[in-house]
Image (tube, rainbow, N blue to C red):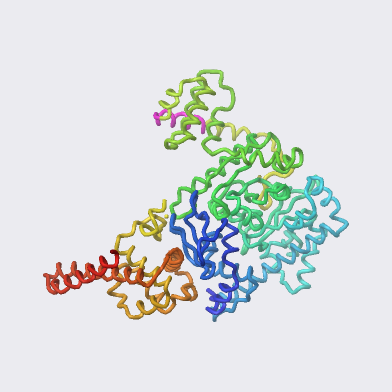
Amino acid sequence: MARYTQESRERVRDAIDFAELVGARTELKRAGQNRLQGLCPFHEERTPSFGIDPVEKLYHCFGCGAGGDVFSFVMETEGLDFGAALESLAERAGVELERESEDPRDAAKRVRRERLLALLERTAAYYVRVLWEGGEAAGAREYLLARGLDEATLREFRVGYSPSRWDRVLMASRKAGYSEEELLAAGLSSRSRDGSGRLFDRFRGRIMFPLADERGRVLGFGARALGSGQQPKYLNTSDGEVFHKGRMVYGADLARAAAAKAGRVVLVEGYTDVIALRQAGVPEAVCSMGTALTTQQVDALARLAPRVLFCQDPDAAGQKAIGRGLEGLAEHNADRRTGTKVDFRIVRLPAGQDPADVVQASGADAMRRLLDGAIPVPHFEVERALEGDLTGTDARDAALSLAAESIAPLGPSVLRSELVKLVSDRLNVPSTLVESVIADPARRRRAAQAAETAAAAAAERRRRAPATGSDDGPAPWDDAPVVHEDPGPEEGFRGPNGAHKVLDRREQTERAFLSYCLALPAEGEQRLGDADLEQLFAAPMTRRAAEYLRGRLRTPAADLPPGDEALARLVAELVIRAGQLEATPAKLELEALQLDLSRLDRLIAGARVSGGEGMRELATQRQVVLDAIRHRLN
């Protein structure tokens, strides 16, 4: 794997405005000379426990334990590895990266990928020019503008048009030096099936929607037909070297900053829905790229914001789409390796309307009201259980059992109480009956199985019925139409497995000492330089931090080794703590005495186990240190 030089990494670190970078995710306020604080972007909280050092470009949350340097922040918020985070920041800062020597095979792969991305990028730009300048694209322009979409927003999404002639992209790309094999690998050309092996443009006579990754790099295209006889209605780039449909979230590159600030992302079905919502003042809109949310797509949504508003038509197809989306959500939230759990909420659209229709017919304010009225998933499931004909006793019993199945996983809460009341009122039964059914898992399971059987039968009936499609429904794929509570700054931190760990008193002392060394670097350098770190620090991670910080107290983030997230997290925590301290040499001396007392306690414990040799001398030393501590405290 290619590596970039340390000098390159430092140029990127120096060039980035860390306050601006983090400020796109959470509002920051001054909380000291070298410290800004705000609500943590990694977990929900009401009182700020998240802080950054804008000079050293380090961050730490005393609530959930998240922390690290500028590269860690991008890795965590955007789901990138170190190399991709470095490249993203370098691109943002306009810094050219220099590579260390790399394996020739890795270098060849990198160069090939860069060429394919450049080919896709130039093709996207070509399609945009054709849409707005080509006579053949007049019908496409008319269609898009009739949907209420303006040119500025369409250009922002780089929407274009592919000419109907079979070889426009092919010939232009050949002329630019690209091979036939590269055109096939990028998904821009197809090979004739008549035995001639002739290449032709895959996309012809279609509205083109570039499909970009979170960094805005074009990986493929979604193409919508205009003619009534043009099939399929949607044609998209096939999975290949650079494009993977299961990872794509359309519009994520443009929605990222807005979603971080809003704390939510709006998930819709169609490309034009995303564009219409951005134009209407809802820039945090994206759409999933297939029939069901994959876990990778849910992960991508979670990186954008902790809350996802799922917009769906309340008809049968919309209900089915929500069900598929919830499956992906449940898988993500059940995976302990994932970070932020996603709060999924359902937006009920007017029957037969998509978000673009709502904006065009009723205005942006109407759409925003629908978004603000999004309901939690359990509320949606209870509402769904209570739909239909509830006049018969059997139907009401079945509805009661199904609604209870959705309420049962909820703990005591206002939401649970509201849903019990909703079921009681809608079915005209006592709330005690609702609670009794919630407490009867066997009855709930029987009702759920009966509902699944009925749903399967209904799906089979729909499958046999003639298919109909909406104007801008879910994009099909390829040729098939498819639709750390903070226990206190000195008490806990987030461990490597994500669980909150309570620090013992000794480790608290070690971290406090290092924080004071950072706050007073002149005195701290002398103390760390003179110390026997192996003896002084018992906790391996704190000892590693002390070894790293020796000689670096004035520039603690400058030489953090790439990929060592644990060290970056701890150094960031110590720097942020140091920024909160009213440090004086006397307080540093007190922390040093506390650390020495801890060292002597360990030695005494070891001497006791080995037979007591040297305990008297150690006890005398301990008393001297203890007296010094008491004297300073008094």
Can residue 258 be seen in this snapshot?
yes
In this rendering, would 121 be left or right of 46? right
Rendered-image quadrant of the C terminus:
bottom left
Q: Quadrant of residue 157?
A: bottom right
Residue at (83% x, 58% y) in the render: 132
Residue 628 lies, with reference to residue 498, above or below; the image says below
Q: Nearer the viewer, residue 612 or 217?
A: 612
The total number of labels drawn is 0
Locate residue 329 relative to residue 629 in the image: left or right: right
Most common SS among magenta residues: helix
Read off the magenta span. Answer: 439-452
Q: Is residue 440 magenta?
A: yes
Q: Position of residue 57 (x, y in %)?
A: 52, 68
The answer to whether 43 appears left or right of 213 in the picture is left
Which of the two residues, 201 or 154, is positioned nearer the viewer here?
154
Q: Nearer the viewer, residue 132 or 428?
A: 428
Q: As rendered, which of 406 and 17 lies closer to the eye?
A: 17
Residue 564 vs 531, above or below: the answer is: above
Horizontal relation, residue 26 to residue 211: left or right: left
Query: Is residue 127 shown in magenta?
Result: no
Is residue 566 visible to us here? no
Residue 305 versus residue 69 in the image, above or below: above
